[in-house]
Amino acid sequence: MPRGATVMPVQRRHAIRAESTLIDGSFRPATIFIDEHGLIEAVSSYGEPLGEIPVEHVVDRLIAGLVDTHVHINEPGRTLWEGFATATRAAAAGGVTSLVDMPLNCIPVTTTLDALKVKLEAIGEQLTVDVGFWGGVVPGNAAELSRLAGHGILGAKCFLCPSGIDDFPHSTISDLRLAMPIMRDLGLPLLVHAELESEAAPACSGDVRRYQTYLDSRPRSWEDLAITMMIGLCRETRCAVHIVHLSSASALPLIRAAKDEGLPFTVETCPHYLCLSAEEVPDGATEFKCAPPIRESVNRDGLWRGLADGTIDFVTSDHSPCTPGLKKPLEGDFCGAWGGIASLQLGLPAIWSEAQLRGFSLEQVVELLTSKPARLAGLHTRKGQIARGFDADLCAFDPDAVTTVTPETLRFRNKVSPYLGRDLNGAVQKTWLRGLPVFEAGVQTDLSGRGRPLLTQRC
């Protein structure tokens, strides 16, 4: 049971009623009764008598709050890039009620217990939604993993190539052979940035304003080689392995074979790999730069097939912002710009815009953004579903609305994103955390302070 679950604020018992509520994989009319601690007390028929219980009627589709397990918040240390206040407000605006913070880009990086304590102290009353934490695996910190787990991390992340941050060095196969048995025994997943650099790739040089120059410097073979290595280590150690932000569709047969073998091996991809393509990136448009890179449209089609057949488990944002200058917008330098896509709050409409063109139902899309990522983080007993005993984390979504992404609509700190100017299908109208509103379209009220750290205790 997550620490802090029994100290939620007391509130008034109430109900939320909608004619189209996603329950057990299908939409139906329902009334959701919420107790004084913000838990779902019962899910009943739409016409269930209410007595004296106050009720809120929802006209949009009512779904569980989204769970985003890949977010770079960057606090403490780099709050000019992002921070707890702005990130969690943006999350609420996107229907995200639980997110998990990555261990790097903050200062200090979350690779020691002392660093985790510094991060927790920085939170204060800033959270609009609930936030969990990944630790980090770096050379020499294997002894810290049990200490981090004992104080609440949900898993740990490593890099197989330079991370871009000097204080978060990449791990070798020897480092992982030390860390993975510890992670296995703790029952925690190892998250992996899966790129192994190879001399076969050309250096990022030449015409640095051309996206193709950058794309050629990080080929799919880097991912495929790294995933092959991690499958072998997963087989050897039986540590649960999760590949973050998959961009290479050519790795899918390897992943499928690992799953068929019964290995504890899971994979995510991101909206930018599913909704954008290399062919559409203009010269100098460094807001499109991320690592691994956005690839060609034929590769994108392959990723959608991987989602459809279950080879790819779910979708996360990999919200990785920075200050505008680090994107080198004046130079348009793809080689020198910071690599990261800012997209927190846009995941559901971005994915829905593309998914419905490919025959996916809204029910399928929601599952990819809720219950499946919740399971990776060990939050699946209280987050990601509308069910009795779960937190009353809810989202009212209008799938037929069309909105244009503008700087004014974005609630994360720096309004730099490849989605600016795009029309997206679907709009979040309201978000509730434990039954209390944390976002409503057109309302600018600051509702920070309602979120809580999501910490699990393991030893």
Image (cartoon, rainbow, N blue to C red):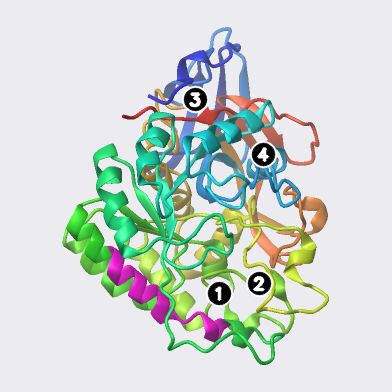
User: Left or right of 135: which side holds 352?
Assistant: right
Task: Tell me if I can see residue 24 in this picture.
Answer: no
Q: Compare marks 1 and 4 and give the one earlier in the sequence.
A: 4
Residue 192: x percent and y percent?
A: 40, 59
Q: Position of residue 366 (x, y in %)?
A: 47, 49
| Tag 1 and tag 2, C-beta contact below 8 Å | yes
Amino acid tagged 1: Ile
Q: Is residue 217 visible?
A: yes
Tags 2 and 3 in contact by the CB under 8 Å rule? Answer: no
Q: Earlier in the sequence, mark 1 or mark 2?
A: 2
The dot on residue 294 is 1
Of labels 1 and 4, the one closer to you: 4
Mark number displayed over residue 84:
4
Q: Position of residue 327 (x, y in %)?
A: 73, 68
Which disc is residue 288 wearing?
Answer: 2
Residue marked by disc 3: 32
For marks 2 and 3, give the CA distance: 41 Å
Residue shown at 71% from the left, 82% from the top = 282
Label 2 sits on what residue type?
Phe
